[in-house]
């Protein structure tokens, strides 16, 4: 077959999720850090063409209230997923895979009963920039850096299937808020008082008192791209620890970027996602109220917030995952597939900790003996 660099990669008629090489017809996988689909057989690089107008359209905000009332069919897609019976994560698998393990909890999965659902289609995706080899190196270095870890733990880092690339669902929300509040403003003043010290001597000291006054008012805030995870498969605080994400690198959603990777379907829907976003907005709103109240101390009694001009985006972000079991307990490790930032769970060796404490006690005892001579 003659290689034609102008010809785009082809989608297999037998499998709509399989993209085949324009040169030899083999299955392609996305090459992290590039905009290419690379063929492992003939080495041909199949470019993923990104249209600038489509890119602008992909990062446009969507009307939240309209979507809740009636979302159009062109904003939906039908997905086929496999649900883990242990942790509930719903991910996609290649059609030729009959069994695998869950990337979120490490449990075995028999891919014998795929389910189909209609979900909101992601409009933008942040492609993997960190290669699997780089991810495995970070995993190994992280394992080696763990203090008081069991001695045989590092063997897990050498497993070929220890790291899996998965695109995770996220929502971002924009909103303008208008908050009416009531509360109290505290203004401090000092007085001088006398007292007897422990020796019976008369002393003086400054004592701070507070006068409280009623306060009420209105504050307005503008929120842009409040991040909300669309998955319950991983702890929210873990995913938040992988931030920041550079959304300037978002590209239009294209199945070409998914080849060779898994994708999790969101379990936090659009409405619940905004409720979670509202929780994240509260600290900023409260800070605005306290600044508006002024004084030395502030108390917020009531607040009523109106949310206006609410928009959203549904995006996919890249994460390398490893879920490994040690002594029948699951530990998870994850890497931001764009920046390489890591977060992980780890076991501890009770014996190493005990030996360390014994060593410290022995050193202290030796120092005391030497000093007493």
Image: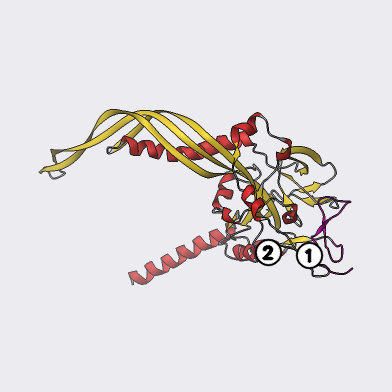
| Residue 95: % across, % down | 84, 50
Q: In the rendered view, would you say 356 is above or below 88?
A: below
Q: Magenta stretch containing residue 301, yes or no? A: no
The mark found on residue 6 in the picture is 1
| Residue 226: % across, % down | 53, 44
Would you name the residue on which mark 2 appears? 34
Label 1 sits on a secondary structure element that is: loop
Quadrant (top left, top right, bottom left, bottom right) of the N terminus? bottom right
Stretch of the chain drawn in magenta: 1-26
Label 2 sits on a secondary structure element that is: loop
> In the picture, residue 341 is in which quadrant?
bottom right
How many numbered dots are placed on residues in this image?
2
10 Å crowding of disc 2: few (<14), some (14-19), many (20+)? few
Q: Is residue 78 visible?
A: yes
- At 75% from the left and 59% from the top, the residue drawn is 161
| Residue 74: % across, % down | 73, 39
For the residue pair 292 and 64, the one nearer the viewer reads as 64
Q: Magenta stretch containing residue 2, yes or no? A: yes
| Residue 300: % across, % down | 37, 31
Q: Is residue 49 left or right of residue 147?
A: right
Q: Which is closer to the viewer, label 2 or label 1?
A: 1
For the residue pair 203 and 306, the one nearer the viewer reads as 306
Magenta part, dominant SS: loop
């Amino acid at each position: 077959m003659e290689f034609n660099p102008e010809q785009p990669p082809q989608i297999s008629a037998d499998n709509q999720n399989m993209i085949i090489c324009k040169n030899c017809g083999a299955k392609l996988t996305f090459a992290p850090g590039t905009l290419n689909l690379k063929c492992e057989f003939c080495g041909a690089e199949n470019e993923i063409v990104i249209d600038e107008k489509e890119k602008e359209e992909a990062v446009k905000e969507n009307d939240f209230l309209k979507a809740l009332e009636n979302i159009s069919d062109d904003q939906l897609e039908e997905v086929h997923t496999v649900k883990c019976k242990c942790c509930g994560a719903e991910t996609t698998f290649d059609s030729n895979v009959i069994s695998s393990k869950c990337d979120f909890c490490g449990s075995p999965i028999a891919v014998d009963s795929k389910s189909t659902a209609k979900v909101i289609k992601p409009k933008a995706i942040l492609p993997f920039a960190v290669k699997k080899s780089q991810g495995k190196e970070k995993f190994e270095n992280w394992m080696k850096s763990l203090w008081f870890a069991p001695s045989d733990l590092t063997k897990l880092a050498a497993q070929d299937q220890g790291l899996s690339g998965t695109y995770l669902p996220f929502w971002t929300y924009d909103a303008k808020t208008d908050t009416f509040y009531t509360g109290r403003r505290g203004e401090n003043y000092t007085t001088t008082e006398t007292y007897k010290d422990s020796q019976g001597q008369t002393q003086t000291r400054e004592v701070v008192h507070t006068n409280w006054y009623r306060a009420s008012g209105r504050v307005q805030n503008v929120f842009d791209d409040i991040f909300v995870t669309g998955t319950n498969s991983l702890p929210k605080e873990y995913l938040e620890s992988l931030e920041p994400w550079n959304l300037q690198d978002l590209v239009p959603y294209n199945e070409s970027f998914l080849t060779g990777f898994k994708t999790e379907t969101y379990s936090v829907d659009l409405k619940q996602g905004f409720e979670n976003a509202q929780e994240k907005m509260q600290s900023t709103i409260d800070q605005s109220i306290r600044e508006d109240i002024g004084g030395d101390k502030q108390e917020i009694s009531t607040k009523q917030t109106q949310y206006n001009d609410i928009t959203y985006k549904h995006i996919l972000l890249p994460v390398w995952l490893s879920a490994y079991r040690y002594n029948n307990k699951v530990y998870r490790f994850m890497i931001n597939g764009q920046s390489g930032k890591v977060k992980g769970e780890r076991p501890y060796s009770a014996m190493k900790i005990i030996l360390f404490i014994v060593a410290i006690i022995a050193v202290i005892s030796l120092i005391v003996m030497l000093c007493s001579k």
